[in-house]
Image: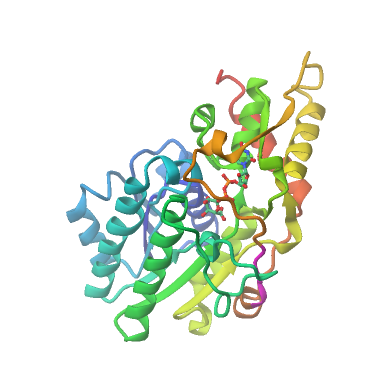
Amino acid sequence: MKILILGVNGFIGHHLINRILAEKKDWTVYGMDLGSDRLGNALHDPRFHFVEGDIGINKEWIELQIKKCDVVIPLVAIATPKMYVEDPIAVYNLDFEMNVNIIKQCVKYHKRVVFPSTSEVYGACSDPEFKEDESYLVVGPIQKERWIYSCCKQLMDRVIYGYGTRGHLEFTLFRPFNWVGPRLDSLYAAKEGSSRVVTQFIAELLMRRPINLVDGGMQKRCFTYVDDGISALMKILENKNDVCKNQIINIGNPNNECSVKELADILKELFMKHPDHINDPSYSEIVDVSADNYYGKGYQDIYTRKPSIEKAKKLLQWEPKIGMEESMRLTLNSFLEENKDISI
Ligand code: UGA
């Protein structure tokens, strides 16, 4: 199988390429990204062809690869809430406009698309567990610009679904629920306060800055360790007996539900016990901050977000294995190991 991964140096992309190269000797991957800092040894593998480039600029190369490949995985997107409120138009341009052009080319060349939807499309849905084919997708008013990401992704889902059901495209939409793990976001983004919560808290611990609990930290997420997520994604790519054809599939770990406050406590405790930090003279305090102060007026939070994974279990014969503490231990340790010599 020949696969094209756009955004291969991103969080999901680089974990996916490593797994493909380790497990699938007869798969070849063509990849593009702005940089290659997360790709390591993969760059030396003859089954991986990497090009440094921008999906907004290198359009001819992309079209050529789409023509040649069997499956296209467009992973380029802005996916950090701070950016949704700071630059909603950049989110629209990249997450919708650039991506919809890629989808149109997949239609033109009859290619299978495996597209990252998101847990954010469910928005503030009140269901205790979000179901792919039943739950309502609920967003706030236009002034709350946070929802631009959810809306862009939802419209992508609807466009892809429309092409698919009219017979113009074969697709699988997968919805990651707060995947975490090594190299989730860069610590430099966290230094500016614009990374996702797990990287943000790790960076605050390293910099001995306060850990901010937005509006008290009672909001909950289900954190999914990236290795579990990638295992599900591999099964989607294998697509045995076409089980994933034109399906939407949540990929998350409902057992790892945890409030942001509990998350801060877990990470702080793991950090304080870590051999490199056990003798630190002081540690970050955990403080409350209002959402307006932290994100600005365009923000609105999501208080519970739990996936139903019945569909993933049934279609993929998959379930997540890595618990909350272990997910955080693995994530924290890798950040500490990889950033030993870097002062952030
Ligand atoms: C994330 C992002 O939108 C995407 O990465 C993705 O599509 C999706 O959800 C997902 O990964 O499933 P969210 O979970 O709200 O959205 O993003 P985080 O930045 O990780 O924030 C989680 C929670 O922690 C929020 O309630 C936020 O207010 C809180 N938070 C964040 C803090 O309390 N303190 C901080 O310093 C940062």
Screen quadrant of the C terminus: top right
Residue at the image position 55 percent from the left and 40 percent from the top: 183
Which sits in the foreground, 301 or 74? Answer: 301
Q: Is residue 27 visible?
A: no
Scheme by which the image is coloured: rainbow
Q: Nearer the viewer, residue 105 or 192?
A: 192
- Residues rendered magenta in the picture: 306-310
* Residue at the (78%, 13%) spot, across then down: 281
282 to 131, vertically: above or below: above
Position of residue 159 relative to residue 52, above or below, is below
Displayed quadrant of residue 283: top right
Q: Position of residue 142 (x, y in %)?
A: 41, 56
Q: Is residue 58 shown left or right of residue 111? A: left
Write down the quadrant of residue 162 in the picture. Answer: bottom left
Task: Give the image location of residue 169, x and y in percent.
Answer: 33, 78
**Viewed as shown, does residue 91 lie left or right of 130?**
left
Is residue 62 found left or right of 140 in the rendered image?
Answer: left
Q: Quadrant of residue 257?
A: bottom right
Counting from the top left corner in percent of width and height, residue 181 is at 62, 45
Task: Please state which of residues 143 and 304 is positioned toward the viewer in this rendering.
Answer: 143
Predominant secondary structure in magenta? loop
Indicate yes or no whether the magenta region holds residue 283: no
User: Observer-nearest residue: 1 or 180?
Assistant: 180
Looking at the image, the residue that sits furthest to the top is 281
Residue occupying the point 67% across, 59% down: 304
Q: Is residue 31 above or below residue 189?
A: below
- Which quadrant is home to the N terminus? bottom left
In the rendered view, tell whether residue 100 sits above or below residue 218.
Answer: below
